[in-house]
Image: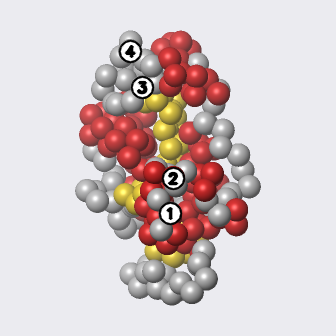
Amino acid sequence: MSADIEADGPVPGRYSMLSLGMCIAGEQDAAGTFTPIQPESARFYRELKPISHEFEPSNLDVVRAGGLDRDRLLREGEDPVDAMTDAARWVNDLAHGRRPVFVGWPMGYDWMFLQWYFHTYSVIGSPFAFGSALDMKSMMYAVTHHVLDKLGKEHIPAELLPERPHTHNALDDAVEQAELFQNLRRWRMPGQRDDY
């Protein structure tokens, strides 16, 4: 599952997750064979009511660019209990009893918010088990050996980049990340073994 969030600050609890977008990226069988799946075939999106009155102005600039209005979400955003319970059920239904894995670029920020919100608000907990997350930035480092702090999306080889723009809409960006993940799984550097 590719997931992306938009939030109004750097950490959950003190600040709020304002939107959540998820989509399928693919399936991997027991032998390790990865099969990409069209990301737009299974998508989930919610806009959430903020849980605190604190926010960072710089974060609001980013979420506004993606079309979110924090004041509107204070009035109209979905209750986090409902949104996160629906999200957990959606992931579980899509996984069909298999272990879902979260993928993101970079994983840390989105994973931190998602897990905190799932464990705090979902009545069924998190669908993602401990260790069920994969950081695409680390995958890229493993195959390219670029200096990690210089491995932003601007350093991704052009043939890996999805055609869709990064919009800061959580669903758009989740789909973009799913496409990047699929491209990364297919990509081989010259001389690289096929079994990485």
The residue identified by callout 2 is 150
| Mark 1 → mark 4, Cα distance in angstroms | 37 Å
Residue 9 image label? 3
Is 177 situated above or below 36?
above
Q: Which mark is residue 146?
A: 1
Can you identify the residue that label 4 sits on? 54
Q: Foreground residue, 136 or 22?
A: 136
Specify whether residue 99 is in view.
yes
* Dot 1 alpha-carbon crowd within 10 angstroms: few under 14, some 14 to 19, many 20 or more: few
Please say if 160 is above or below 60: below
What amino acid is labelled 3 in the image? Gly
* Label 1: which secondary element: loop
Image marks 4 and 3: residues in contact by CB distance under 8 Å:
yes
Of marks 2 and 3, the one in the foreground: 2
Say which amino acid is labelled 4. Answer: Glu
| Residue located 48% across and 38% down the image | 5
